Amino acid sequence: MELSVINYKGQDTGRTVTLSDAVFGVEPNTHAVYLDVKQYLANQRQGTHKSKERAEIARTTKKLKRQKGTGGARAGSMKSPLFVGGGRVFGPRPRDYRFKLNQKMKVVARRSVLAAKAKSAQVMVLEDFNFDKPSTKSYINFLSDVKVTNKSLLVLAESTPNVYLSARNLKGVKVVTADTLNTYDIINAQQLLISEKSLERITALLA
């Protein structure tokens, strides 16, 4: 598949690039994508949730009523989960939700989502660019010039502070480098903007 290269002003440079079939032309593996996204979201969880069980509640342990003759169930402590303010049964405890996923599986997942984006015509290749200084207005003008109005992901070859700082306050916009590109970010974006050098890097990493 061939795509035209445009500059950050939205103008056609007259050059084209060929998307590698080994990356952008594969048959998507939906299960690999599911596992990769599941791991990404699991790794974002803090796992600090906690509720008090009956051993941790500060309430009296005095016997509330006599054992027999009341017509109700026996009760020996206000800490019981049966009473309002009592401890919770099997409540959540701090835990680590992280789990491992093979690197080959991650590669398959990224290939799959990139191929799906390419097939849906949601990939745009840009000439490498930078801003003179951080400017949110400059990034808004850039999106307007390249006619991107929905959620977008810009992939650069290397860290470019001026571009990153210009985009970080905008909703629905994210800037990453080719080395940190992940399956979740690709799926979450409706338009994928890839610089020429980052395309070479992506191909080298995933082909």
Image (tube, rainbow, N blue to C red):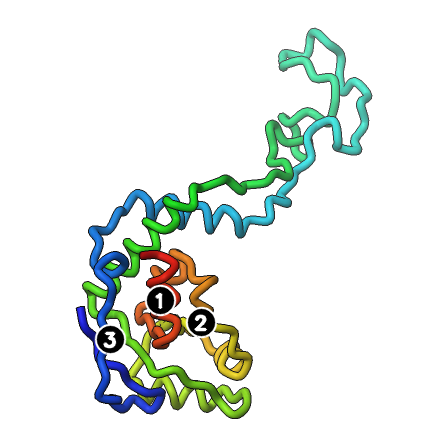
Residue beneath disc 1: 189
Secondary structure, mark 3, is strand
Q: Is residue 130 above or below residue 184?
A: below
Do we see residue 152 in this rendering?
yes
* Quarter of the image with the C terminus in it: bottom left
Secondary structure, mark 2, is strand
* Quarter of the image with the N terminus in it: bottom left
Residue at horizontal 25 percent and vertical 61 percent from the top: 24
Which circle's residue, 2 or 1, is located before the other in the chain? 2
Residue at horizontal 20 percent and vertical 65 percent from the top: 120
Q: Is residue 13 above or below residue 103?
A: below
Residue at horizontal 50 percent and vertical 40 percent from the top: 99
Residue 174, label in figure: 2
Residue 115, label in figure: none
Identify the amino acid type marked 3.
Val
Q: Nearer the viewer, mark 3 or mark 1?
A: 3
Binning the other alpha carbons within 10 Å of mark 2 as few (below 14), some (14 to 19) or many (20 upward) gives some
Do we see residue 116 in this rendering?
no
Q: Do the numbered discs 3 and 1 sit on residues whose CB atoms are within 8 Å?
A: no
Q: On the image, which quarter does residue 92 sit in?
A: top right
In front of the other: 47 or 13: 13
- Pinpoint residue 38: horizontal percent, then vertical percent: 42, 46
Residue beneath disc 3: 17
Q: Is residue 101 above or below residue 28?
A: above
Which circle's residue, 2 or 3, is located before the other in the chain? 3
Q: Do the numbered discs 2 and 1 sit on residues whose CB atoms are within 8 Å?
A: yes
The answer to whether residue 69 is left or right of residue 37 is right
- Pinpoint residue 19: horizontal percent, then vertical percent: 24, 67
- Pinpoint residue 102: horizontal percent, then vertical percent: 43, 42
Binning the other alpha carbons within 10 Å of mark 1 as few (below 14), some (14 to 19) or many (20 upward) gives some
